[in-house]
Amino acid sequence: MRSLPVSAITTFRHLLTITALLPLVLASVVELRSTAACAPDPSDRAPWAELDPPYRTDFGTPQHENCAVHSGAPLDFGELTEPPTAERAATSTADDIDVIAHWYNDFGLDSTLASPGWNGWYDWQWNFPTNRDGDDPGSELRYDPARHPALGFYKGDDPRALGWIAYWLRSAGVRAVSFPQEAGFTTDGWGGPTRDWLEQYLEHTPNSDALDYVLPIGTRGGPAEIERRAVQLVDTVRDHPHVSVFAEDGKRYATVNAWDLESLRGQFDGYANLNAPKTVAFLRSVASSFRGLGYDGVAVLARRSGVLGQRWTQFVPDGIRIIGSTYDGLYDDGGTHETYADYTEGIDYDSIPALQENAAIGTFTALETTFPHPSGYRLAGSTPQLFRKQLDRARAHIDEHGLPRVMTVYNVSEWAEGGPGLIPNARDGFGYLEALRRAIAGEPEPAASALPARDPDRADTDAGTPRNPTADRRTRRHGTGPAPTSRRRWVALR
């Protein structure tokens, strides 16, 4: 059994003192939470976090804010209040842009706890105030309030936590959520003792039917396994008919995502066979299965569309609509960027040939990885204002080039790899959700006079720069000017 960290021992001593002062403590719950081991420091809040969103935020007590580390028994995450009901959006019109948010949900899962090995994904160690930039106890603290969820370190398969997230996403105008996964969707293990979070979401979560969804087809594992999982995917769409629909030329395609169509082609045909007859036959079978459910075929949002994406028009008669949908963040014109602000200013969709036709543009709430996650995003300084700038530029590019009326957002809650997501955090509050909602609704950004006064001693933090930025940066590309004003609208909040 692991020994308790010093911070937990200190908290225990505080609790002994508090017991003698219980009446005072009950009258001062907010102040008590600020001294908890994992509670956020109120001074970390940025000015835009003080703006009140036009939807409910009374989710109850944040979960698991005692820095408890798993040491055998499952953790007690606590219980949130029941989320309010979110209403489904009206059917999209030809001018609307559907926003699809990529939802990676890695933390607080029973399925992780049931797996062998390290349990840091389960108990949220990577996000604790005690997280350091390396294994050495003397290394620099890497706590970032932008990675501290307002829900606390929530249980990722808790239907109430998922229900609040779904409510907020829908309230901000998100049309659908996507669950990318290279191995593909599966219902293996559903109904068993270990809760699969997608089972909890689709089967038991309030508000899951207020959002459309996009499930992944597998692109590795061999043809037989890919086909088996595809059958499970279609059966799930049959049972949960609010799948995301891509509408074009009077046809309605059930939408899936694919991690890598080149990998799929390699699995079925080998990379040398550019005609890919077996791969196309597989996609035809998926399209046929969806036609049996009343759709006109399948739309594939492909992170890497490859050879098949280049020839997408020839597959439309077979009910296969392939759309390039990369979201790797390389959407600028070739320079080196040190910060997220540099990257955002450098976005130049016109310089990327693959984004001039048949592409779903991707936007990014943040692009900064925290230790010990191995991914290399190193663009510090994300803010809701910069995210809004990305949204407006992407919308303008879609309008000007007649691209498919789809935009993706990375990410909902991939706190370790990507950084702060759409759902509220301790630094930004509901800032990212509000940036998205205001962009969709065509509302201007809040005027500087509407924001609370900024503490000049905290200017770097308020601007979104972490307290402990690393010197190592990923090479990015460099920049252009402001986005032109869009002439068309997004999918409405209706």
Image (tube, rainbow, N blue to C red):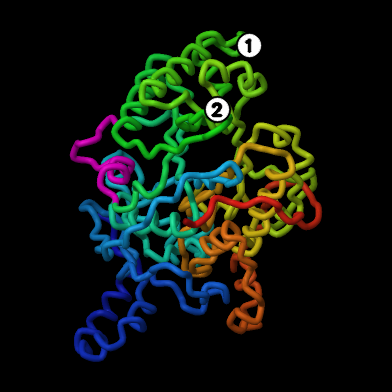
Numbered-mark total: 2
| Residue lying at 57% horizontally and 73% vertically, measured from the top left | 48
Residue 274: numbered disc? 1
Residue 165 in the image: state x and y as whole percent: 39, 56
Which label's residue is closer to the chain start, 2 or 1? Answer: 2
Which residue position is annotated with label 2?
Answer: 260
Badge 1 marks a residue whose secondary structure is loop
Mark 1 is on which residue type?
A: Leu
Which residues are drawn in magenta? 187-205
> Against 44, is 31 above or below?
below
> Against 179, is 71 above or below?
below
- Crowding near pointer 2: few (<14 within 10 Å), some, many (20+)? many
Magenta span has 481? no
Q: Can see residue 246?
A: yes
Residue 10 in the image: state x and y as whole percent: 32, 76
| Residue lying at 22% horizontally and 51% vertically, measured from the top left | 72
Badge 2 marks a residue whose secondary structure is loop
**Pick the front one: 181 or 168:** 168
Residue 442 in the image: state x and y as whole percent: 62, 61
> Against 406, is 270 above or below?
above
Magenta span has 204? yes
Mark 2 is on which residue type?
A: Asp
Q: Is residue 475 left or right of residue 370?
A: right
- Crowding near pointer 1: few (<14 within 10 Å), some, many (20+)? few
**Pick the front one: 477 or 171:** 171
